Amino acid sequence: MPVKMLFVDDESFILQSVKRVMRSKTVEVFIAESAKEAFSILENNNINIVVTDIRMPDMNGIDFLKEVRRRYPQAYRLILSGQVERDDVLNAILQGVAFEYLTKPWKKEILRAKLHHIIEIQQKLSNDNIINLINTISQLPKNMEILRAVEVAINKDESIERIAAIIVEDISITTKILQMVNSAFYTTKRISNVQQAISILGLDTVKSLLLTSSFMAADHLKEWQQEENKRMMSASIHVHNVYTLLYKHVTKEKLPDEFSSFGLIYNIGKVISLNFFPERYLKIKELVARDSCGYYNAEITLGYENETHQEIGAYFLELWNFSKANVEAALFHHDIESASVEYRQAFEILNKATEIARSIDPETLKASDLSTLIDEENSW
């Protein structure tokens, strides 16, 4: 069955150009010159991917995608934009309105390759093994509702103060956020206000913490699962901190907001397996211990190819409107060459950070320690 792709732009020559570029047996292209026309197409067709311009006469493209997300949350949403709207576009991506943007003007080879890459990812996350596995989860953790409420508040462009008020309703999540922001890595001053913590950590990082913390409070967990959850949470925060420093060391630039939560969520598939498929998780860990192999290699050996923690985590992140960058961090951290070109260096640095994190005490992590270790290894 072909992938159904809808392009929305008020300039007909652009629509015809895109239609020619994407014409193939595997892609069915729909075009619309207005939001009204687009909604008519969406209502009568099961559209997989929606691409829209920002500047349209009847409805702003970002507002259009907000409505698409509300009515058709399964559709993958992209923005077609010029450089003048870059800040608006990046905000829309961070808020989950769109997963990615394509720039105007484009080269047809780049446009075709990018869209086919997105189609490939969608197909990876739509395989029956993953869908059937996720559908066996009978009930998500209760305080997942906090994440949902924060997501709604972000979508409505509500204030940091309002978002903080939602978070403090759950003491366990509040404690984890304050614990993270008060580590020596972030500040030498005591932070006791969630609003301040959000400002320091950033919404993407806080959202990732909400996701991982939600699993830790699930009622059905046995004691060993609770302890393993705590261990993985601490390890993720440590990798996140090392990754932040390492990225700056390697690129000489501050870690972009778009990449800021990779260290916290790239292994979310393992957390989901631990919490909802414990027998499978133990089986994999037993093979890891017996053969001294990695978790991912153990999954492949046991026949879980195409339903590894990579696919599980990516499916879940997309379900919860995390950005395309975060979805790819989960999906391709063991397969970097399959990731979008613009993310590959960030994923390589992330993988190196996971190695380095094993050699540094999380309680005393400083940029100088990291630099010394890197120089000793002569790795970068």
Image: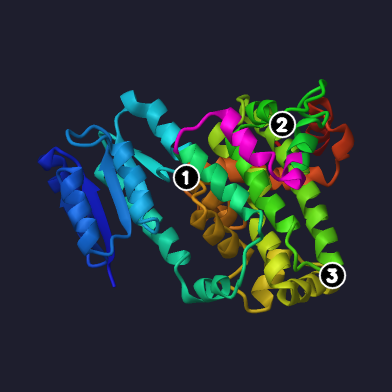
Magenta stretch encompasses residue 172 = yes
Q: Is residue 47 left or right of residue 340?
A: left
- Which residue is at 25% across, 45% downward? 108
Inspect this view and state whether residue 114 appears. Answer: no
CA–CA distance between discs 1 and 2? 22 Å
Which residue in the structure is indicated by mark 1? 341
Specify the quadrant of the image occupied by residue 218. Answer: bottom right
276 in magenta: no
Q: Which residue type carries mark 1?
A: Val
Spot occupied by residue 199 in the image (x, y as percentages of width and height): 63, 26
Picture disc at residue 289: 3
Task: Judge depth for marks 1 and 2 and give the one in front.
Answer: 2
Element under disc 1: helix
Residue 78 location (% of width, % of height): 35, 45
x then y, percent, for residue 75: 36, 56
Mark with earlier residue (1, 2) = 2
Label located before the other in sequence (1 or 3): 3
Q: Secondary structure at mark 2?
A: helix
Q: Residues within 10 Å of mark 2 (few under 14, many from 20)?
A: many
Disc 2 marks which residue?
A: 245
Over which residues does the magenta segment extend? 156-174
| Residue at point 11%, 42% (across, down) | 12
- Coloring applied to the structure: rainbow
Sequence-wise first label, 2 or 3: 2
Q: Are marks 1 and 2 in contact (CB under 8 Å)?
A: no
Q: For this rendering, which residue is in front, 60 or 98?
A: 60
Q: Residues within 10 Å of mark 3 (few under 14, many from 20)?
A: few
Is residue 270 at all visible to an observer of this figure? yes
State the residue at coordinates (27%, 66%): 26
